[in-house]
Image (cartoon, rainbow, N blue to C red):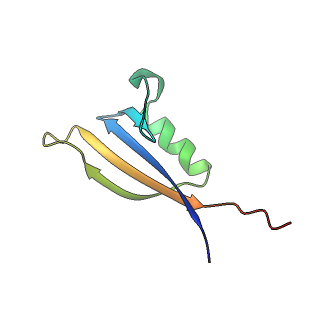
Amino acid sequence: MPQWEYHYILAFNTEIDQINDQLVQRKTHPLMDYLNQLGKDGWEMVGICTASESGNYWRLLFKREKYIDKT
């Protein structure tokens, strides 16, 4: 049975505020660039929802299969 690991992003419009509950500087993490890198690294988006009434904040949840060394 596969085991999963998860990745969480809080984004404001098109810039990232938090990655896995760690604050980041918005200008250093453009959202589209980061999403493309996550896809290349095997992450799949499994959930997205607004995190504010204004719709400017978004919560994004990703998962990928955990690598288990069986040697």
**Up-down: is 4 above or below 10?**
below
Quick check: 4 left or right of 8?
Answer: right
**Up-down: is 21 above or below 8?**
above
Q: Which residue appears at 35% of the width and 40% of the height?
A: 10
Q: Nearer the viewer, residue 2 or 60?
A: 2
Determine the residue located farthest toward the left in the rendered image: 53
Determine the residue located farthest toward the bottom in the rendered image: 1
Quarter of the image that includes the C terminus: bottom right
Q: Nearer the viewer, residue 52 or 44?
A: 52
Residue 22, quarter of the rendered image: top left
Residue 64's spot in the image, x, y percent?
56, 59
Q: Which residue appears at 55% of the width and 54% of the height?
A: 43
Number of numbered discs: 0
Residue 68, quarter of the rendered image: bottom right
Quick check: 64 left or right of 16?
Answer: right
Determine the residue located farthest toward the right in the rendered image: 71
Residue 53's spot in the image, x, y percent?
13, 43
Quarter of the image that includes the N terminus: bottom right
Q: Nearer the viewer, residue 34 or 5?
A: 5
Q: Which residue appears at 52% of the width and 44% of the height?
A: 36
Q: Which residue appears at 42% of the width and 21% of the height?
A: 27
Residue 30's spot in the image, x, y percent?
44, 30
